[in-house]
Amino acid sequence: MNAQHEALKQFGNQINYSIENYKQHGLKATSYSNIIIAGLGGSGIGGQLVKAYFNSLMPVPVTCLADYHLPAFANEKTLVITASYSGNTEETLSVFNEAIERKCTILAITTGGKLAQLAQQHQTYLLLMQDGFQPRMALGFSLTYLMLVMGELIGQDLKAQLVSTSSAVSDFMSYREDALSLYNTIKNNLNHKFVILADGSTEPIAIRFAQQIQENAKHECFVHTLPEMNHNVIESYYGTLDSVFFLMDAGINKRVSSRFEFIQNLLEKNKHLVIPINIASYNLVGMYELIFKLDWLSLFVADEKGVDSLNVPNIAELKAFLG
């Protein structure tokens, strides 16, 4: 079994590590006018996941930032959370420095690198992750830290739910088997691109799945979100397309669920392979479990294609070019 499989088995241990190493920040969301979570790739998707999870709970706006510069509204009433697994992501370091200039409150999450140095230099709150993983295989650390950070901001203690989640995913075989079952459904269609149709709640889970398919399996994967895609993308769904479709409905909005039903019927009528991704319930545990299962699926696709799921040569070449 390759290194990525072994890394994924540590998902539960990553959650435990973050629970055990979390330190309270003592801040309240109502002390700020807005919150910005800055990060990219495997270090950025956690921000999108917690933003969706806390959407109906957080009393101030939350913005996820995957760029070099803070928006114009960021000021001393802004809480900026910077996440970089390596600590050397140039976009995130740029945001940290701008946040210092604008007198924002800053929280940093990293394994070390320049981000940890800056946090220590400016005496800002710092949470350290365990190193030794690819950033995309270290989501258990950053997502759990962010869950605890955001929960504390609104006075909600998520530790018990996270402990339960860790216990569940530590017994990885059932999730691996579920992923294998999904893989067997699609293994004869790996010459097709993947398209994931999500709702607002599951969109970040869909993005995470797409990112894992792209990086691990070197395979094209795209995400569209309902109901928005019903006003545009649906008009490209004529005839038989070179795509496998995954449907990811949290079941929260009946009108959106009806839209999913229509889309599935439309696609199946035109002989497409449509894979509904079942979500038992949209809650913290369910979110982690679905991410874990789909991570396994991305590795099975990579193995079948015979690609190197560990290394990312194009990204490495880009970084060398920029350097």
Image: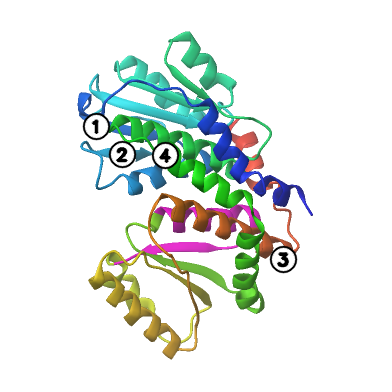
Q: Which residues are magenta?
A: 204-226
Q: Gap in Å between the C-alphas at discs 2 and 4?
A: 10 Å
Kindly identify the residue that appears in the image at 26 percent across and 26 percent down.
Answer: 28
Locate the N terminus and report the quarter of the image it occupies: bottom right
Which is in the foreground here, disc 2 or disc 4? 2
The CA distance from mark 4 to mark 3 is: 30 Å
Vertical placement of 306 versus 272: above or below?
A: above
User: Which badge, 2 or 3, comes first in the chain's sequence?
Assistant: 2
Residue of label 1: 34
Residue at the right extreme of this rendering: 1
Q: Are marks 4 and 3 in contact (CB under 8 Å)?
A: no
**Which quadrant holds residue 113?**
top right
- Which residue position is annotated with label 2? 63
Compared to 127, does 238 lie above or below?
below
Relative side of 273 to 54, left or right: right
* Label 2 packing within 10 angstroms: few (<14), some (14-19), many (20+): some
Give the Cα distance between marks 2 and 3. 36 Å
Label 4, residues with CA under 10 Å away: few <14, some 14-19, many ≥20:
some
Query: Could you tell me which secondary element the residue under label 3 belongs to?
Result: helix
Query: Which of these two is toward me, 66 or 208?
Result: 208
Q: CA distance from mark 1 to mark 3?
A: 44 Å
Residues at marks 1 and 2 touching, judged by CB atoms closer than 8 Å = yes
Nearer the camera: disc 1 or disc 3: 1
Distance Cα–Cα, label 4 vs label 1: 16 Å
Image location of residue 256, percent across then percent down: 27, 70
Residue at 50% of width from left, 36% of height from top? 142
Q: Which residue is mark 4?
A: 66
Residue 267, position as x, y percentages in the image: 42, 83
Question: Callout 3, which amino acid?
Answer: Lys
Which labelled disc corresponds to residue 305?
Answer: 3
- Return the x and y of residue 191 as percentages of the image width and height: 63, 74
Whether 35 is drawn above or below 122: the answer is below
